[in-house]
Amino acid sequence: MPGGVGSLSPARVLADGITQRAGVIARRSAAGRTGAACAAVLAGVLLAPPGHAEALSREFFGVSAVEPHARDFGVMGQSRVGTYRMMLLWPGVQESAKARYDWSAPDFEVASAARNGMRPFPFVFGSPPFAAGKTEAPPLRSTKAEKGWQRFLTAAVNRYGPKGKFWKRNPSVPYRPVREVQVWNEQNSQHSWSGGPEPKQYAKLVELSAAAIKRGDRRIEIVLGGMYGYPERGQSIYMAKFLKRLYRIRGIKRRFDGVAVHPYGGTLELLVAQVESARRIMDRFGDTRAPIWVSEMGWATAGPDDFPIVTTERGQAERLRGAFQILLDRRRRYLIERVIWFAWRDFEHEICPWCGAAGLIELSGDPKPALEQFKRFTAKTR
């Protein structure tokens, strides 16, 4: 991919925070987070044909891709992927405080997605060395860091948003501007929030980010970073607890438009339990109209045998079919805005024991059975 970011690999940062979660997920799966009635419904879903009576936007189903090749985007388009979730990495665009922005890497992804019928959906993430000690540390340690982060976000919106310079300078690229921006990634995990997650700090980042994004274009919607339900112990915070604490912060509810979850789990019951938990908390705090974004979900076809997220290729396809169908069936009940699979293609980076095998296609480009199931759902979108 042109315009690489050197040692700050997008693949590493994208999956940061996923590592070592499987032990906790296994315990939660064994505990049975849902009742027998829910389990029976989920079992029936696996036998039901995909489909939905109501016309569904193509953007409903999407993928995340780790360092995609140019040829990947054509296959995504043929598969009717509608939303392309991409990392917009601040240190990948600006290496030093005085450096000019280098948009070459995100330009490639935005253009490739738009040319193949996809809406770019960026999550903004990462701090360069002048803003924080680590990439995964939020840019909150100084006024200089905060202002730098805000300038970066406003510039990104001015480039890729509805009135963006990118579209004016590239008239041959189909006009599919960024309409939503996700702030950070898995901020309830100690691996994605250096120093340990803290809802008050995250609320501050959301407030700074929302102000900067709206300064660029008030029509852009703000989505919280995706939270997974049961991150590993240590300083990480379970999604439900983190979200409750966030909502208790005065005024924060007005700063964002949607909540995102990453409901990884060994079973469909566990996936649904995490989405349901988020909806229940949102309703409890009066955020009844805000949608839920499932901005990552998936299962891998290789990895340690005792990892509940690891299954066979057939198992991956069955789980995708079951998960997609039940999320469709409960789309209105939970107000689900998007369902995004992690990841599009397998990759070689050793960023977690199973991540590199979570793709819908193999590293070679050969499709797995799960891709055919994915296409059966996207074929019914408009």
Image: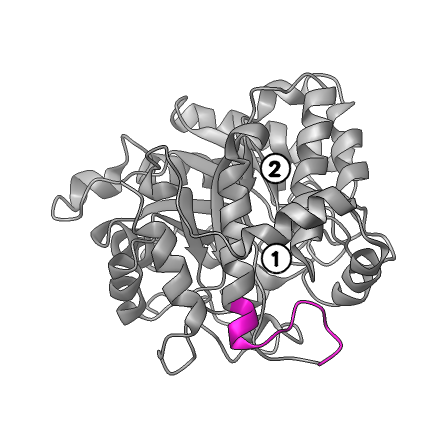
CA–CA distance in space, label 2 to label 1: 13 Å
Helix, strand or loop for disc 1: loop
State the predominant SS element of the stretch in magenta: loop
Report if residue 314 lies within the magenta region.
yes
In the rendered structure, the answer to whether residue 189 lies left or right of residue 123 reads right
- Which part of the image, by quadrant, shows the N terminus? bottom left
**Residue 83 within the magenta-colored segment of the rendering:** no
Q: In the rendering, which numbered label is found on residue 146? A: 2
Q: Quadrant of residue 102?
A: bottom left
The type of residue carrying mark 1 is Pro
Q: Where residue 286 sits in the image (x, y, percent)?
A: 68, 16
Residue 69 drawn at (x, y percent) = 33, 71
Count how many numbered circles sit on residues in the image: 2
Residue 53 x, y percent position in the rendering: 37, 35
Quadrant location, the C terminus:
top left
Corner quadrant of residue 326: top right
Q: Nearer the viewer, residue 86 or 78?
A: 78
Which numbered marker is on residue 98? none
Considering only order in the chain, which callout, 1 or 2, is on the residue closer to the N terminus?
A: 1
The percent position of residue 138, horizontal first and vertical second, equals 67, 46
Q: Is residue 188 left or right of residue 347?
A: right
Magenta stretch, residue numbers:
305-316
Question: Residue drawn at (40%, 42%), measured in percent from left and top?
Answer: 60
164 left or right of 336?
left
Please say whether residue 283 is visible from this viewpoint: yes
Which residue is under mark 1? 129
- Picture residue at 51% right of the left edge, 39% below the top: 329
Q: Secondary structure at mark 2?
A: helix
